[in-house]
């Protein structure tokens, strides 16, 4: 797991070596285990580790490469989180998955499941995106993995699909032809 040493030391990534030393000394005194008021051994160890990396020019350069990659991931995460359309797309994918599983259960109650690859193909959603939706819908109790390893809609999932259908007429359960 990536540890943001700049955040830990509450300093800018552009800080020079003198600033790194000054801030390290401040936090080292504050969190040293011998300090009876604010001592914290775990925090002190983290600060020493951060200092050891940031004070060495070679280690810092290597760390800064990882820091930039991590910063890029954070920017991507923040961008995606601020995109309201992403949540809407997720709701559409989940409704589509429930609809597919609803129709499959209705067609064959004794064999109601759809395999992962087939679900990916029918939904048009890649596996890496489906994993989130499958996790979420399993946690909500809307779907489950049955004995043969396929995924099937549950009673709660049927109720959810029906409530979505009634609430939003634009969401229609897939008909028989769509699953053939």
Image: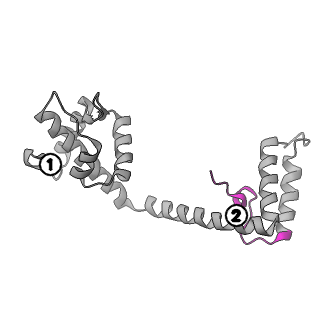
Relative image position of residue 36 (x, y in whole percent): 90, 39
Secondary structure at badge 1 equals loop
Q: Is residue 6 magenta?
A: yes
Q: Earlier in the sequence, mark 2 or mark 1?
A: 2
Q: In the rendered structure, which segment of residues is drawn in magenta?
A: 1-18
Secondary structure at badge 2 equals helix
Relative image position of residue 64 (x, y in whole percent): 68, 67
Q: Residue at x 64, y 54 (%)?
A: 2
Residue of label 2: 63
Q: How is colour applied across the structure in the image?
A: one colour
Q: Residue at x 85, y 42 (%)?
A: 39
Q: Residue at x 82, y 47 (%)?
A: 44
Viewer-proximal residue among 75 and 61: 61
Q: Is residue 30 left or right of residue 95?
A: right
Q: Residue at x 81, y 58 (%)?
A: 51
Relative image position of residue 180 (x, y in whole percent): 10, 46
Viewer-proximal residue among 118 and 92: 118
Q: Is residue 19 left or right of residue 119?
A: right
Prevalent SS, magenta region: loop
Relative image position of residue 141 (x, y in whole percent): 33, 32
Numbered mark located on residue 172 in the image: 1
Tell us which disc is closer to us: 2 or 1.
Answer: 2
Q: Is residue 53 magenta?
A: no
Distance, label 2 to label 1, CA atoms, is 51 Å
């Amino acid at each position: 797991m990536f540890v943001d040493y700049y955040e830990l030391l509450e300093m800018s990534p552009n800080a020079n070596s003198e600033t790194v030393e000054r801030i390290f000394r401040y936090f080292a005194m504050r969190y040293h285990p011998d300090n009876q008021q604010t001592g914290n051994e775990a925090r002190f160890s983290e600060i020493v580790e951060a200092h050891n990396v940031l004070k060495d020019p070679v280690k810092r350069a290597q760390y800064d490469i990882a820091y930039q990659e991590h910063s890029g991931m954070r920017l991507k995460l923040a961008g995606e989180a601020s995109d309201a359309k992403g949540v809407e797309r997720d709701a559409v994918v989940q409704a589509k998955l429930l609809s597919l599983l609803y129709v499959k259960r209705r067609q064959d109650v004794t064999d109601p499941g759809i395999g992962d690859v087939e679900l990916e193909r029918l939904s048009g959603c890649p596996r890496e995106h489906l994993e989130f939706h499958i996790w979420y819908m399993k946690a909500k109790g809307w779907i489950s993995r049955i004995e043969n390893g396929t995924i099937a809609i549950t009673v709660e999932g049927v109720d959810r699909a029906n409530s979505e259908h009634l609430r939003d007429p634009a969401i229609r359960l897939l008909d028989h032809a769509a699953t053939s």
